[in-house]
Amino acid sequence: METLHLPRKERIMMRRCNEQDYAAIMEIINDAAQAYKGVIPEDRWHEPYMPQEQLQQEIASGVCFWGFEENGRLTGVMGTQDKEDVTLIRHAYVRTNLRNRGTGSLLLKYLETMTQKQILIGTWADAVWAVTFYEKNGYRLVSPEEKNRLLKKYWHIPDRQIATSVVLVGRPK
């Protein structure tokens, strides 16, 4: 009798992150953010890219982190933050060694179903791969004037970061 070997199914889920996930969130963000080193302005780069205090401040300001979990391990994270009439996508990162497998797109699509509001995404202008990712997922860049207005209205970032960032907008689902 022959034994049939079937591939094991991976357990995949998207879920809201909790306090027990903070170390994994920082690990994912700081790992994936290495791609920005040497790309974003030097005066905006720091090690670690997201220290624990900043993560706590982001959560205290209303950023809710969601995770893509495979076999019990977080492999990607994205934050959402409701601001008046829009939802911001914040801190979208996938572990470096697990990129380009659709994790980011699946997580983004999942988060899109959770809001009826206009979705805005801010990222570094020189992070071409990030801009391309969002464009492939149906987002479009706004004009420089609109970017400045949106960043000043919905984000709390320094002028230097505003000058070196872009904003993408997606239609409500």
Image: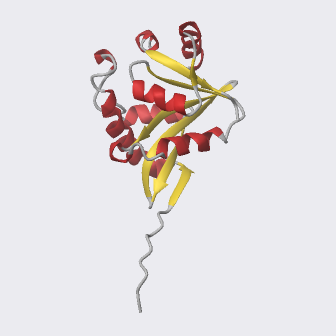
Q: Can residue 156 be seen in this view?
A: no
Q: In which quarter of the image is residue 146?
A: top right
Image location of residue 76, percent across then percent down: 45, 45
Image location of residue 87, percent across then percent down: 63, 30
Q: From the viewer's perspective, is 49 left or right of 155?
A: left
Quarter of the figure that contains the N terminus: bottom left
Along the line of sight, the residue nearer the viewer: 9 or 89: 9
Name the residue rendered at 49%, 41% in the picture.
Answer: 104
Along the line of sight, the residue nearer the viewer: 102 or 12: 102
Colour scheme:
secondary structure
Image location of residue 137, percent across then percent down: 56, 34
Q: In which quarter of the image is residue 38?
A: top left
Q: From the viewer's perspective, is 169 left or right of 100?
A: right
Image location of residue 27, percent across then percent down: 35, 43
Q: Pick out the residue farthest to the bottom.
A: 1
Above or below for 29 versus 14: above
Q: From the viewer's perspective, is 152 left or right of 33?
A: right
Along the line of sight, the residue nearer the viewer: 105 or 162: 105
Above or below for 142 versus 82: above
Q: Pick out the residue farthest to the top.
A: 145
Above or below for 150 versus 171: above
Name the residue rendered at 29%, 25% in the picture.
Answer: 46
Above or below for 88 versus 104: above
Q: Can residue 102 be seen in this view?
A: yes
Name the residue rendered at 67%, 41% in the picture.
Answer: 114
Name the residue rendered at 54%, 56% in the picture.
Answer: 13
Q: Quadrant of residue 108?
A: top right
Quarter of the figure that contains the C terminus: top right
Count of labels in the image: 0
Q: From the viewer's perspective, is 67 left or right of 28?
A: right
